[in-house]
Amino acid sequence: MAVDLSKTRYCEALQCPKRVWLRKYKPDEYDESYDNEAILKQGSEVGDLAMGLFGAFHEIVRDDDRDKMAQDTQIEMKKGTSVITEASFFVDKLFCSVDILRNLGAGNVEIYEVKSSTKVKPIYKHDAAFQYYVLTKAGLNVQKACLVIIDNQYVRSDELDIQQLFKIVDLTDEIRDLQRDTVKNLADIAAYMYTAGDNEPTRNMGKQCFGSDAKDSLHPYDCPFFPYCSRGLPKPNIFDIRGMNIPAKVKFYNDGIYSFEDVLPHIKKEDYKQQVDHELHETEPYIDKNAIRSFLTQIQYPLYFLDFETINPAIPQYKGTRPYQRQVFQYSLHILESAGGKLIHKEYLGDPRKDSREEIAQRLCQDIPAGACIVAYNASVERSCIQDLANEYPQLRTQLLARLTHFVDMMAPFRDRLYYSKVLKGSYSIKDVLPALFPNDKELDYHALAGVHNGGEAPMVYLETAKDDCTDAAIKRQQMLKYCELDTLAMVKIFEKLQAFTS
């Protein structure tokens, strides 16, 4: 008994075997909003770069026809091609493409699985173990099974050195030890699919539905089929409580406590209770006017509403930077010199083909006076970005640190629930707070923006504009400017709304 599996589906089945069934019989229920485009794109770029680790290589062209990919691989193997990327094998309905295959001749090979991570995760070992199993079934002698990850201690020089960027971790012994588990897992998956047939199997929701960074976790990502599997639960339900940890939610679920009505008597934390109670009973927002008034006393004119955009690419783009190092590339600044005064806007957007951080640091010192009241949303990010710039450019350190003396976090009233509305659903993100305070205001609608709508898209678009084949870089830059401008304008509007609550 065998089941048609790729290495991706195999790893998904380790998280939850029902995912494989849903992939086969209900593929349209896959929720693509769960896919992180930036992470997928980054993984692809890292994989492409790593192909050159061992010199010249031949890449097997991706094709929907797995047999053709496997045949093309065999042609290269017989030709004696020493390095084959995306080397593909299809044996007993099991398919895998090896990121990098070193062909040593006489049926001896080494496999290298490339990841954009800086650490070895348990699921990566099972991924490599599946490949080892398939290649062994194909009659090859796998002499080494390795993982290629990012070395986050690498500092780029003028040119990128992929030999230093990547770290090769030899997992051969562990992968061989996992072969017995792989055989059992494959048998279990096949039995599960055979027993279910085309009748949807029943499986309770649980921790496997959600991503986890635990050391022994085999489910690093949230399941894109969760909306489908949870369709029978009342809306809202226990899984909609913002901030509650997954084990606690699963325990309620296993105890048959699903709805907000059912869970309300059992929860003790005030934030959870407030969310549930408001969504069940309240029509008007909760506003603690005295506490908001106290918060506003921190804010003193002139005001500088500041927002940064940053990149943290796996592949360092500039000399002196490390993988995944956070780097500021853009800021928006709205200035309000006095109550009722004219609102002034300043902005900066770097050139993605060079490191713009020093110029940003200089411009910040020009645009914001020392000791000024700087207002940011989740101010710890802006504070730490300025601290990073101060550490990077000693000649500007004193000036930059003088901008850290009076920071106010506009997120605090919403994080601390001084204002709360049922439409927030437990969130205090500015993307949720703004429409809660200003419903139906198109000028303050992130969804109405063109091209860039959130902080995940901005860095991806920024790096795209550095590429030679980017034909609409000017348009994209305008989109990034509009997005970042809305972030600081939003803070101004929120500040004015908080003032109105206390007047």
Image (tube, rainbow, N blue to C red):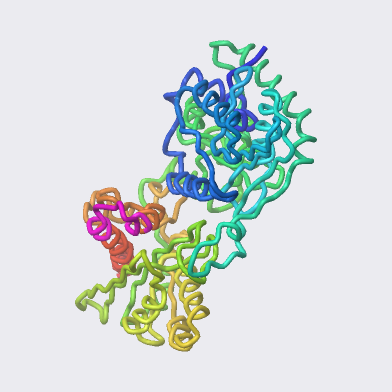
Q: Nearer the viewer, residue 227 or 441?
A: 227
Q: Is residue 381 above or below residue 442?
A: below
Q: Is residue 6 above or below residue 442?
A: above
Residue 162 location (% of width, % of height): 56, 57
Q: Which residues are magenta?
A: 463-478
435 on left or right of 400: left
Is any part of residue 273 visible from this angle? no
Q: Nearer the viewer, residue 172 or 183?
A: 172
* Quarter where residue 133 is shown: top right
Q: Nearer the viewer, residue 44 or 399?
A: 44
Figure quadrant of the C terminus: bottom left
Figure quadrant of the N terminus: top right
* Quarter where residue 341 is shown: bottom left
341 on left or right of 57: left
Q: Is residue 394 above or below residue 451?
A: below
- Going 23% across and 75% down the picture, which residue do you hit? 344
Q: Residue furthest front?
A: 79
Q: Nearer the viewer, residue 67 or 201?
A: 67
- Going 50% across and 74% down the picture, which residue do you hit? 388
431 on left or right of 10: left
156 on left or right of 500: right
Residue 175 location (% of width, % of height): 74, 37
Residue 279 location (% of width, % of height): 43, 43
* Quarter where residue 153 is shown: bottom right
Is any part of residue 204 visible from this angle? yes
